[in-house]
Image (cartoon, rainbow, N blue to C red):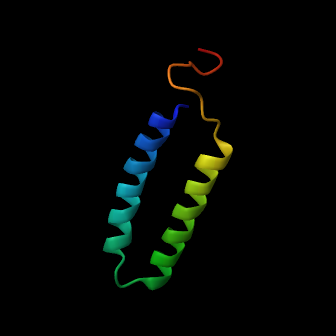
Amino acid sequence: MTMTDKLRVVWSVTLVMGIGFVLMGKVPVGRAIRAVVWMYRQLYFFLRVQTLPEGQAPEGE
């Protein structure tokens, strides 16, 4: 996955999770869990998913 693709995915998921975070204003435990899941997902996505140079197709395509 190229860095451009990663950034698109990160922004879209962050937007959706952010909306859920705002709507959980009266559920602090839910907000805390959502924040932890978001941080874990960011770390996993950038540290474990391989970043390919722009223009390079992933293996198998």
Please tell me which residue is depicted at 36% across the width and 56% down the height of the picture. Answer: 16
Count of number-bearing discs: 0
Q: Position of residue 20 (x, y in %)?
A: 36, 66
53 to 51, vertically: above or below: above
User: Looking at the rendering, which quadrant does residue 8 occupy?
Assistant: top left
Furthest residue in direction top, as rendered: 61
Q: Position of residue 9 (x, y in %)?
A: 44, 43
Q: Is residue 47 left or right of residue 5?
A: right
Furthest residue in direction front, as rendered: 53
Furthest residue in direction right, as rendered: 48
Q: Is residue 5 left or right of residue 58?
A: left
Please tell me which residue is depicted at 45% across the width and 35% down the height of the picture. Answer: 4
Please tell me which residue is depicted at 38% across the width and 70% down the height of the picture. Answer: 21
Q: Check the picture and name the quadrant holding the C terminus.
A: top right
User: Looking at the rendering, which quadrant does residue 53 occupy?
Assistant: top right
| Residue in the foreground of this view, choosing between 30 and 51 | 51
22 to 50, vertically: above or below: below
Please tell me which residue is depicted at 32% across the width and 72% down the height of the picture. Answer: 22
Q: Check the picture and name the quadrant holding the N terminus.
A: top right
Q: Position of residue 42 (x, y in %)?
A: 55, 55
Q: Position of residue 45 (x, y in %)?
A: 59, 48
31 to 8, vertically: above or below: below
| Residue in the foreground of this view, choosing between 61 and 27 | 61
35 to 60, vertically: above or below: below
